[in-house]
Image (cartoon, helix red, strand yellow):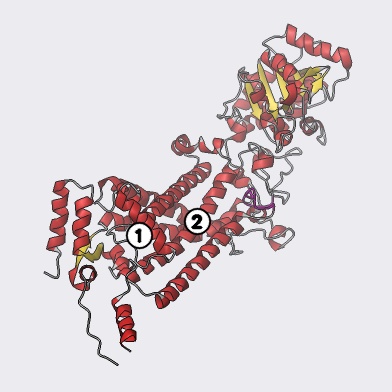
Amino acid sequence: MATIAPPAPSKKHAAAGQEHLVPVYVWELPVRLSHWGIVAAVTVLTWTGLYMNHPFLIFPGPRSWTMGTVRFIHEFAGFELIGALIVRFYWFFAGNHWARWREFLPLTHRQWESLKAMGRYYTFRQQKPFEQIGHNTLAGLTYIVVYTLLAVECITGVVLFAAVEGSPTLRFFVGWIPRLIDIQWIRFMHFFFLFLLMAFFIHHVYSAVLVAVTERNAEMESIFSGYKFVPDELVDMEVEISHLRPRQFFKLRKIHRSRHWDR
Amino acid sequence: MVIEESVLETCRRRGVSRRRFMQFCGTMAATLALPKSYAQTIAGALSQKRKPVLVWLEFQDCAGNTESMLRTTHPTVEDVVLETLSWEYHETIMAGYGKHAEAALKRVVDEEKGKYLVVVEGAIPTADDGIYCTIGGRTALDIATEVCGGAAATIAVGACAWDGGLVRSNPNPTGAVGLHEAVPGIKIVNLPGCPHNSVNTAAVLVHYLTFGELPALDPEDRPLFAYGQLIHDQCERRAHYDAGRYVQAWGDEGHRKGWCLFKMGCKGPEANYNCPTVRWNNATSWPVKSGHGCIACASSRFWDTKSPFYERLPHPAGFGVDVTAGEIGWTVVAGVAAATAAHAVGHVVRDHFHPGNGDGTPTEKAKAEKQTTEVN
């Protein structure tokens, strides 16, 4: 067996190599807070909601208050979810480059490339996901759908809450909805979208782990810390083509340089 | 012929004691959510005022609202109020028939214009020029437009007169609609329910007699005193709901103990009506008290929207009659989970057989292996 000479690293390989990775502060605090706020709320809402639809535990005791408690938790978590969504919605317009609404839509040529490349990636026609610091465009579109589902869940939830709560203010805002769509179908939507969100949850965790394992860019850690580790050249390229104004370019670059661990 | 006597006088003539009459006035005040003192006001009004002329029109329906009013164990004051208002016309119970009956109706419309009350029972067909319900050669729509148009107020009793009810339920071959859709712009009080509760109907009439105006209405022209609250919030089984005690099957221990019927498809949580407080059969009972879930009979289009009556949620169209939202939902979740697992396996298998950089070029490891193979 002949000895194998280590091949000279190509330029591309060097760019993706460990030694040139820089930490980038991608997910700002409101993004992470709203993310985990949504996770916590949806987890609680799922279990309490499943119980409320089909009370699978019976408490024959004279002093139990199970459904009352479960409903209280559900309503509380529901308002927490609304709060988290409002924060995230605000951050679509006030956040950094990767949190803004433009990141979620295929608006630029590069975003279309990202969309097509991720399509190829998930159908095994391409081995690596599209190199992007924030969301890839396929994920962005998925999140648009998920935010819409969550918003519909919140609205239908408030309609159902208003039906039992009887507050004139709530009825003023949502009282017209049950006259357009029957309350039973509102209840149906409120229940059925839960399963779409559960299906999304499975896919979301899987694809995050998949990309994290493939890219080795601290994707999973980033939603806790806010930092992703990305090749220096990618940072330069994204800053160049991003929609940020020159001053924001500068600010962004300064963050990167100050957090630079390798140089 | 217009009877010139007050409700109290009619009651006396029918053998109703003053005590029962006062009891009735108190009940009416309570039903209308008025303070106790208003019982006196109501009694005063019913003792003095001449009863207005009333005509009862019956269109596409089962006569259930008439039955609900007539079939009580003994004549109550509600019946007296309803029966002894100057009824000039009621197809089901009037003695006259044919030309004489129609002449009576015509006389009321012509002579009492703007003063008489109309009670309408049943839906109005609109398909094919409304030929599916004609009385004396005239369509229901024609009669309703003329009679209701000249009335002081119209009371639409029952689900059919409100929004078409059973007659309008899918597929609605006669194009039936409720009265306020068929004859828009009239002064109307809707008293939905299948059938209407005659206590509420009497209360609306009493309110009109006492105050000279109709009670406060919600955006769908239903009186707030009767349709302002959820059944669920007034239900005597509500404590079992909050506690987590549910009937799981008909006749099980929970059912025998009178637990909550939520899991048996009770629509109390989405239905507005005063059924639990007013009740039926001289306030003896109401569906939930007797052990059957509410079917939301006073809700809009309830035959279509609230069915299946014995399940929590409607069944989505296009999946077969017995497929529930939960079954579809869990299938979606299981499908995505299976696809995810398959994708993960596929990923591992692909990486095993086709390692690469992702852009078509082989990885360094693959190159090295290839080199090794070539050298060998």
In percent of width and height, residue B67 lies at 80, 32
Q: State which quarter of the image contains the N terminus of chain B.
A: top right
* Region in magenta: B310-321
Q: Is residue A225 left or right of residue B241?
A: left
Residue at image location 66% in from the left, 20% down from the top? B183
Q: Is residue B13 magenta?
A: no
Q: Which class describes the residues within 10 Å of circle 1: few (<14), some (14-19), or many (20+)? A: some
Q: Residue at x 63, y 22 (%)?
A: B188
Mark 2, secondary structure of its residue: helix
Q: Is residue A227 visible?
A: yes
Q: Nearer the viewer, mark 2 or mark 1?
A: 2
Count of numbered tags: 2
**x and y percentages locating residue A166 in the rendered image:** 50, 40
Query: Residues under labels 2 and 1: Cα distance?
Result: 19 Å
Q: Which residue is mark 1?
A: A36
Residue bearing the label numbered 2: A196
**Which SS does the magenta portion mostly show?**
loop
Using the image as rendered, state which of residue B188 and residue A188 is in the foreground: A188
Dot 2 falls on which chain?
A
Report helix, strand or loop for mark 1.
helix
The three-letter code of the residue at mark 2 reads Leu
Of the numbered discs 2 and 1, the one sitting upstream in the chain is: 1
